[in-house]
Amino acid sequence: MTHIYAGRPLFWKSGMFNASYGLLNWVLSPFGINHVSWLSRYPMLSLIIELTWQWTPFMMLIVLAGLQSQPGDMLEAARVDGAGWWSTFRELTLPHLRPYIELGVLLGAIYVVNTFGDVDTMTQGGPATATTNIPYFLYEQAFHAYNIGLASAMGVIVVILTIVVASFALRLLFSVFRMEDAK
């Protein structure tokens, strides 16, 4: 079977999570954890770790953009008024970052709905169907079960639902940005 996408997930499958010579087992071996077959014992956790590693820098850039857009005079006024770092973060910074965090969550959710290469390369949807997501299920229906009609219909429905949910979420998010600009 040929894999459509194999770059980064192949590194994680063979370089990080391998039971015999994987980096994760090597790092954990001084603690008595060794020769763990991560992809067969903890397939979902393995995918979550890999996707988190992949998307953390992008999400941090979104949060950094939010932090850089925060007015410095508000923070200075809070310091002059005697606010501590925790109350400044809780009352000023976190509410200011809310739209940026929501944007990151929305983009991450859209990406997770479309994740195929990672699942195909690392776990092939298994063991059993432990890591089968919508794109991989559609792929199996179309190319393994030869149920092209069902896969096509389900694909269209998934795309329509994704567009509806993303449109609603983006409208909500942009209304929050507009309210933030009006302040």
Image (tube, helix red, strand yellow):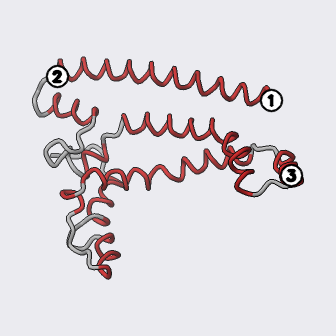
Looking at the image, tell me whether mark 2 or mark 3 is earlier in sequence order. Answer: 3
Residue 165: image x %, image y %? 45, 22
Please count the marks in the image.
Answer: 3
- The image quarter containing residue 15 is bottom left
Viewer-side residue, 125 vs 147: 125
Q: Residue at x 32, y 75 (%)?
A: 28
Residue 38 as seen in the image, left or right of residue 160: left
Q: Which mark is residue 183?
A: 1
Binning the other alpha carbons within 10 Å of mark 2 as few (below 14), some (14 to 19) or many (20 upward) gives: some
Image height of 109 relative to 172, above or below: below
Q: Between marks 2 and 3, how big is the CA–CA gap?
A: 61 Å
Q: Residue at x 68, y 47 (%)?
A: 90
Q: Residue at x 37, y 22 (%)?
A: 159
Which residue lies under the disc numbered 2? Answer: 148
- The image quarter containing residue 120 is top left
Looking at the image, tell me whether mark 3 or mark 1 is earlier in sequence order. Answer: 3
Q: Between marks 1 and 2, how big is the CA–CA gap?
A: 52 Å
Binning the other alpha carbons within 10 Å of mark 1 as few (below 14), some (14 to 19) or many (20 upward) gives: few
Viewer-side residue, 83 vs 22: 83
Residue 19 as seen in the image, left or right of residue 31: left
Binning the other alpha carbons within 10 Å of mark 3 as few (below 14), some (14 to 19) or many (20 upward) gives: few
The amino acid beneath tag 1 is: Lys
Which residue lies under the disc numbered 3? Answer: 76
Q: Residue at x 58, y 41 (%)?
A: 101
Image height of 83 relative to 17, above or below: above
Q: Secondary structure at mark 1?
A: loop
* Quadrant of the snapshot with the C terminus: top right
Which one is closest to the eye, mark 2 or mark 3? 3
Image height of 105 relative to 13, above or below: above
Q: Between marks 3 and 1, how big is the CA–CA gap?
A: 18 Å
Residue 56: image x %, image y %? 50, 52
Residue 47 as seen in the image, left or right of residue 77: left
